[in-house]
Amino acid sequence: MEGYPIITRLAILLGCTVYGFTASATGDNMLVHINGSSTPVQVEISENTKITFDNSTICIAQTAGETTIEVKDIDKIVFDLHTSSIDDTSVSLSDDISFTVAGTLITATSVSESHLSLHIYDTSGRKVAEVSGQGSTDYDFSGAKSGVYIILCGDKTIKYLNR
């Protein structure tokens, strides 16, 4: 991958099909599937997680330590949901939580009126927002930069593309 632009490397990491790689998190983890391994690498998504590229490797720094993975060895990366600001959709993230995208407005609603939080990160791992509420909470991306964001809602990880 050396010599490829950083955007190509990020595309591989964040969900695009590029040069035969696919990327699509379970719980509050993103799973990185390595070619030839039956056990995926679990990457905790938090404000302490930093993902950087160094030529042909991805370095993932987490609270538990640092992991280096050769880009060529990645088979796929898995998220719970992929969506964008051009999608108008409503999905059930669990028996209790529904997640709605209406353009740039993201809304999470709890059927049982429990407390909800949305933790929103950019692709550098920087937390850009955290919102919460009793029964429902939302975040409007209309003032945010275009790009890919990772949203934690309950125990689900969502990749959101703001256009």
Image: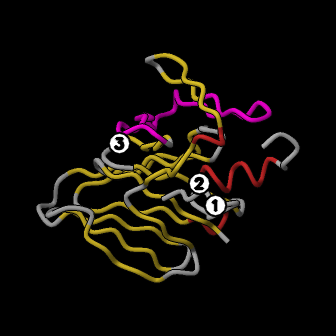
Q: Nearer the viewer, mark 3 or mark 1?
A: 1
Distance CA(mark 3)–CA(mark 2): 16 Å
Q: Which residues are magenta?
A: 36-59
In-image side of 161 versus 81 (left or right)? right
Helix, strand or loop for disc 2: helix
The tag earlier along the polypeptide, 1 or 2, is 2
Helix, strand or loop for disc 3: loop
Which residue is the site of mark 1?
20
The crowd level at tag 2 (other Cα within 10 Å; few <14, some 14-19, many 20+) is many
Q: Amino acid at mark 3?
A: Asp
Residue located 61% across and 49% down the image: 13
* Residue 60 locus on image (x, y percent): 58, 29
18 lies above or below 73 = below
In-image side of 117 versus 65 (left or right)? left
Q: Does 116 appear in magenta?
A: no
Residue in front for this viewpoint, 63 or 2 = 2
Q: Amino acid at mark 2?
A: Leu
